[in-house]
Amino acid sequence: MKTLLAKGLRLLEVAVVVVILGNAFFSRLGVVRFHGDESHWIATSCYLEALVPSRFAEPEWLRRTSVPDTFSAPGWLAATLAPEASATHVWSAHYWTLTQPPVSRYLIGLGRIAGGYAVADLNIPWDFHIPDAQNVAMGARPSSGVLWSSRAAMAFLSVISGVILFLLVRRCGGAIAGYSFLGMYAGSAYFLTHLRRAMSEAPLLFFTTLALLCAARALTVSPRRLGRSVAWLLLMGVCAGLAGAAKLNGLALGFAAAVLCVVVAFRYRGRDVKRWRVAFLAALLVMMIAVGVFILVNPFLYPQPVLRTVAMILFRRWEMTNQASRYPEWHIPDSTARIFIVSMRVFRDYPAVHVEFFNEGLTALGLYLLIQGVWRWLGRKKRIVDAARIEAGTGLAILVVAAVTALPPLLTPLDWDRYYLYPVLFVSVIVSVSLGWIASHWREVVALYTES
């Protein structure tokens, strides 16, 4: 009876969280400030219909697109970028296939279709070289209905991501930690802007949270169940491939899954098996799955998967270099400026609480708590989930995923707000863990403060 009651209360809690997040992310969805890049993502959502080329008629603007003349690819990539290298133009090498993988476009397209809009209802891509009024006159701004439907899909994904993160933070740091994160996520102007726009951030976060959930499950399964842990990590590889196919940097999650294969083998305490061989094979398989899924969902890569993936990476680097020169006011010139700008953005400007020392101090405390708990756990000391400890398996999953996703964006040459999504998210997670610990140990904290 008590078990049924506990499950009922947990389901009720999840339902309340869904209602809170649904209200936050769907409320006034149409008045989120429009960004020209949304025009690009919505226009190219026609790639969902392009998955069936025989039934797809390319819009004129897409048919005219080619590889930019100023992009100089190495000679060994020339053949794969030639127009004749693909059977159809829509999946050949040109700006839209090189600049980003297509899964975010698919998901935006699903939202658009759910709203009753077809390819004929789409806008043309925004041109940042001409005035906004001219773009609107040319039909580059999506209609209000198309925009709302496309954003609704992003809001839906963001709500699911928020629920998963709430549950993981709650498990890691307790109820107060979970509800602290809920407040920071649902009350953050930064998240409510970037995760509701019809762009790649919401899909990227969605598949990242799924990968994080798989990682946490793999690490919290009994150390004697090696097969079950490996199965969760293989599923994490699928999520990593989809995250990379939403935005290229999501592929880094495949490395996180590979690292966790080694951790699972280290923790294994079952019957005698060659666990390190299992770890190596599992890590290799996880990486292969991530890459395989990344290729499977992108027909552009089919003719030459390796070369075209390299071409996408080189093209993205070339595009960021051009953006830095085109918008010098957003360019981060050197390491000194980077330290100042990045810390200001991550700890003051973009978190829900705009107090730098608050976020920095609690992030440092949270990292200490997570690392201490993981160290004890890896030392095979008894894992205790109560008010006094951090749940170490979930904590390690958070640390590893944060390391491969939140640290690389800090090296970006562009000071663009959406590039800080991962760092701001994981600062919010770690700050919430700290708040949960402080709430459970407030007497000790007060005593330490009064003694000093």
Image (tube, rainbow, N blue to C red):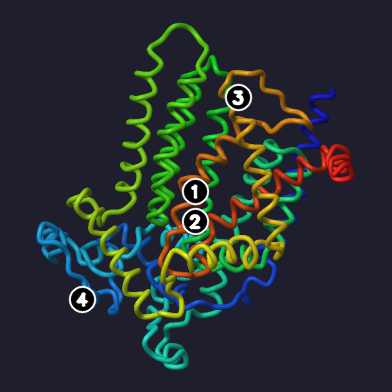
Left or right side of 94 for 178: right
Looking at the rendered structure, which numbered label has been put on residue 70? 4
321 up-or-down from 295: above or below: below
Distance between mark 1 and mark 3 Cα atoms: 27 Å
Task: Answer whether residue 140 is visible to the viewer in this image.
Answer: yes
Residue 60, position in %: x, y? 28, 79
The local secondary structure at tag 2 comes to helix
Which residue occupies 37% across, 67% down? 46
Task: State the residue in front, 22 or 443.
Answer: 443
- Element under label 3? helix
What's the distance in space between the residues labelled 4 and 3, CA to CA? 53 Å
Q: Nearer the viewer, mark 4 or mark 3?
A: 3
Q: Are marks 4 and 1 in contact (CB under 8 Å)?
A: no
- Secondary element at tag 4: loop
Given contact means CB atoms under 8 Å apart, are the residues at marks 4 and 3 in contact?
A: no
Whichever of labels 4 and 3 marks the residue nearer the N terminus, that label is 4
Disc sitting over residue 207 in the figure: 1
Of labels 4 and 1, earlier in sequence is 4
Q: Quadrant of residue 79?
A: bottom left
Query: Pointer 2: what residue?
Result: 203
Q: How far apart are labels 3 and 2 at the CA level?
A: 32 Å
